[in-house]
Amino acid sequence: MEILNLKMLALLQAAGITWPLDPRLSPPSVVPVVEVIKDCVFLKSEYDRNKDRAKLESFPDKTELESFINHVHLPFTGTRESLLSCLSYAASLREALMALTQSHRFRVELSISDNDGSPRTACRVSFHQSTPSDISSTEEAEGFKSEAILEFDVPT
């Protein structure tokens, strides 16, 4: 499943980029390290930074815990290069998660917010293990008026 809202489609079109990325366009990106801890899957760097707060009993469920830990904020300046950088990170995250797809399925979300019209905006990439309640639709993605949204499942 892949969902792109109109705002994301407009960003991609303006930059002359298609998703999934053409590997020739994608700047080299370090593949994030992911690890399984007590049936949760985490970005190792983010888990190490937050492991004191990463207690399942502190969250309603495993999805909330993974979402809390597994997000990164990337700079987005509105340029084609910064958009490629954000998308490249998401593509490299897909690559890292593919190694675990024998026993896990994932939902990856990339959002770029307007930041109230500021020239500098932010890109957020996050993931969690898919659950039956992960039902997204294009209509739901269109509900985010100030964000460009891309969601995809791993494996697709």
Image: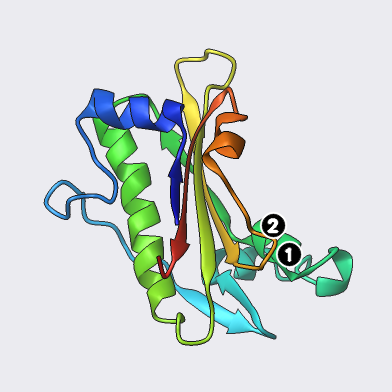
Residue 6 in the image: state x and y as whole percent: 43, 28
Do the CB atoms of the residues marked 1 and 2 lie less than 8 Å apart?
yes
Q: Residue at x 31, y 51 (%)?
A: 88
Q: Work out which quarter of the rendered image holds the N terminus and state it.
A: bottom left
Residue 7 in the image: state x and y as whole percent: 44, 26
- For residue 50, above or below residue 110: below
Q: Work out which quarter of the rendered image holds the C terminus and state it.
A: bottom left
Q: Which residue is mark 2?
A: 68
Give the class, few, some or many, for how many residues have Cα within 10 Å of label 1's Cα (few <14, many ≥20): many
Judged from the image, the secondary structure of the residue bearing numbered disc 1 is helix
* Relative depth, front residue between 114 and 152: 152
- Tell which residue pokes out farthest to the top in this image: 117
Q: Is residue 148 left or right of residue 69?
A: left
Point out which mark residue 42 bears. none
Give the class, few, some or many, for how many residues have Cα within 10 Å of label 2's Cα (few <14, many ≥20): some
Q: Quadrant of residue 62?
A: bottom right
Q: Residue at x 49, y 26 (%)?
A: 121
Q: Residue at x 28, y 41 (%)?
A: 84
Q: Residue at x 59, y 75 (%)?
A: 41
Point out which mark residue 65 bears. 1
* Relative depth, front residue between 55 and 103: 103
The amino acid sitting under disc 1 is: Leu
- For residue 85, above or below residue 64: above
Q: Is residue 23 left or right of residue 67?
A: left
Judged from the image, the secondary structure of the residue bearing numbered disc 2 is helix
- For residue 138, above or below residue 88: above
Residue 144 in the image: state x and y as whole percent: 60, 29
The amino acid sitting under disc 2 is: Phe
Q: How is the image coloured?
A: rainbow
Q: CA distance from mark 1 to mark 2?
A: 5 Å
Residue 140 in the image: state x and y as whole percent: 61, 38
Q: Quadrant of residue 145?
A: top right
